[in-house]
Amino acid sequence: MVDELLIDEIEKAIIERLEPLKAEKLRIEGFPDNPAELGKPVVIGQILVGYRKESLSKPSTFVASAPIIQDWTLSFELSLQLKNLRSHTGAYPIMGKIRNLLTGYKPSVIQKPLYQSEGGFVSIKEGVWYYSMIFSVSLQFVKRPWEN
């Protein structure tokens, strides 16, 4: 059901939008295909971006000859792995910068704005703070029974 091309393009647009944070010496990239490649963050930290989930409403109609129309929400996770909390490259200011960069941002492939739907502390391991931020976009899924 999920349009993999659309997901990939939104993910790439989010990564591109976060480019200014590279000035803070952060590595920003998509989640690797192989989880073993995750590794530890570079000098200051890293932000990994990936598709997390989708949710769909009940169809607006159940008539066999009518299109099935559903509210469709796609969510993308930003996994922050940072060595500090409060410095200018720490978790708190970086989360604020991410929120400002992504809230209201409309990737060209969808023309709908992203909004933050969740976020918070995940864990601390070996001196690295792990936080998660979820950004979502609300779309409409339409399936016409006569199209396959």
Image (tube, grey):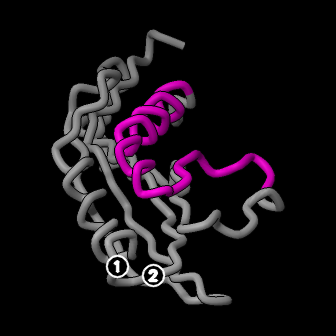
Q: Amino acid at mark 1?
A: Ser
> Relative to residue 22, is residue 95 depicted above or below?
below
Of the 4 image quadrants, the one containing the C terminus is: top right
Residue 38 x, y percent position in the rendering:
73, 61
Query: In front here: 148 or 135?
Result: 135
Residue 26 lies in magenta, yes or no? Answer: yes
Residue at horizontal 38%, vertical 51%? 21
Which percent across, then down, holds residue 121?
Answer: 42, 84
- Is there a contact, CB below 8 Å, between mark 1 and mark 2? yes
Residue 97 pos. (x, y %) = 26, 59
Front residue of 41/54: it is: 41
Return the residue at label 2.
84
Label 2 SS: loop
Question: Which residue in the structure is indicated by mark 1?
Answer: 87
Q: CA distance from mark 1 to mark 2?
A: 6 Å
Relative horizontal placement of residue 5, taking residue 93 as reference (left or right): right
Q: Position of residue 37 (x, y in %)?
A: 79, 57
**What's under tag 2, amino acid-wise?**
Asn
Q: What residue sits 70% from the left and 69% below the top?
A: 40
User: With respect to residue 30, does 10 lie above or below?
Assistant: above
User: Residue at the spot x=35%, y=44% of the render?
Assistant: 20
Residue located 60% across and 88% down the image? 127
The count of marks equals 2
Q: Is residue 17 magenta?
A: yes
Residue at the top extreme of this rendering: 146
Say which of 143 and 89 sits in front: 89
Q: Label 1's element? A: loop
Say above or below: 143 vs 54: above
Tell me the crowding category of disc 2: few under 14, some 14 to 19, or many 20 or more residues within 10 angstroms, Cα based. Answer: some
Q: Which residues, given as a range, are shown in magenta?
A: 5-34
- Up the image or down, 109 lies above or below 89; here it is above
From the image, give the main secondary structure of the stretch colored magenta. helix
